[in-house]
Image: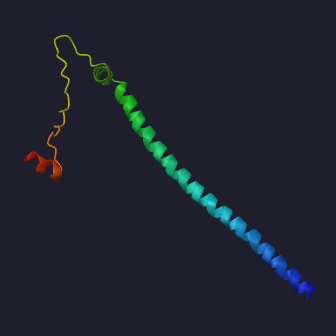
Amino acid sequence: MALAAFFVLGIAWFSYLTWGIFSKEERARQDVAETKAQLASLEARQATLDSDLNELDTPRGKEAALRDTLGVARPGEDVIIVVPPVAATSTTTVLPWWRRFLDWF
């Protein structure tokens, strides 16, 4: 009887250890998947930044960057600054019913 209890406890302990290993392995797989997704995102961003750097390396790109950031123009050119329209504000207010009633008097 004691030997059977020992084997049952041994199997339970082994199952507990095995379950811990499997849960750690699953967590590691999820971490790998997240890391691969982050890597793909960073590689796409790097490709975009590389293309932007290549564009800025040309004389036309340098001129466009100066015009955009500093707002400069060549001699004889005019700089136009476009201002967004101001949203119309409504000044109409609805008076409460009691205030409208008192306004009759």
Name of the residue lying farthest toward the top: 75
Q: Quadrant of residue 14?
A: bottom right
Asked whether 31 or 40 is in front, the reply is 31
Residue 66, image x, y percentages: 31, 20
Render colour scheme: rainbow
Residue 85 relative to residue 40: left or right: left
* Residue at point 18%, 37% (across, down): 87
Q: Quadrant of residue 20?
A: bottom right
* Residue at point 28%, 21% (across, down): 67
Residue 92, image x, y percentages: 14, 42
Asked whether 27 or 47 is in front, the reply is 27
* Residue at point 36%, 26% (across, down): 56
Q: How many marks?
A: 0
Residue 55, image x, y percentages: 34, 29
Is 81 above or below relative to 92?
A: above
Name of the residue lying farthest toward the left: 104
Residue 36 relative to residue 20: left or right: left
Is 18 above or below relative to 77?
A: below
Name of the residue lying farthest toward the right: 2
* Residue at point 7%, 48% (across, down): 104
Residue 40 relative to residue 85: left or right: right
